[in-house]
Image: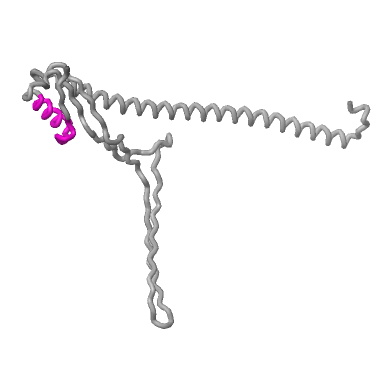
Amino acid sequence: MFKKLNFNEKEKKKLIGLLIVGALCVVSLVFLNFVQDKQQVSKDIQDDNQVTKQEESEEQKSSEKDDLENQLTSILKEINGSGDVSVMITYDNSQEIEPAYNSSSTKETTSETDSSGGERTVETASENKTLVTSDSSNPIVIKTKEAKIKGVLVVASGASDPQIKQTLYEAVQTALQISGHQVEVYAKK
């Protein structure tokens, strides 16, 4: 190829230099593409892990609610004469989480007096809040408020007896620390 074009030594060196730079560019592009693909795979895995954690958290909340119903059902079955018991608990809201914040506030007061003796005071206040996160960029939780119970429905085969119905009613109020208007007890068929 070089013999037909008749390049002198200086031109050959420039051409070889350009070919080397071109080859380095191609290698760099291939390397960057490989690194970028690897980062995308890593990000996809991280996103999948976050979705899995959220699903596990929701399943855990659901499981805790089911556990409370099962616990209440089993304790109410132990009451003499209650018979077969079913319990359903409804919630007013979901669990509330209070995250940690770094906050700073500033307050500035400026007083001005004009030449005619008038005075003016200007107050400026600002507050800056920043969410505190852990190493895995999840927020740090200060406290968690459990979901508030809205109502409890109890269906028991022994509830046709007024004394047992009253006992079940009081047991639910005591166990869950809720008021009477939130509890209903019915007899099973």
Which corner quadrant of the image does residue 167 belong to?
A: top left
Q: Which residues are magenta?
A: 165-183
76 relative to 139, above or below: above
Question: Residue 155, image x and y in percent?
Answer: 18, 22
- Determine the image quadrant of residue 30: top right
**At 18% across and 21% down in the image, what residue appears?**
73
User: Which residue is rendered at x = 12% and y = 25% of the image?
Assistant: 168
Position of the C terminus by quadrant: top left
As drawn, the residue found furthest toward the left would be 163
Q: Position of residue 139 (x, y in %)?
A: 38, 38
Q: Is residue 112 above or below residue 52?
A: below
Residue 179: in magenta span:
yes
Would you place residue 116 above or below residue 156 in this image? below
Between residue 56 and residue 130, name the one nearer to us: 56
Is 132 displayed left or right of 66 in the figure?
right
Residue at (31%, 28%) from the top-left corner? 61
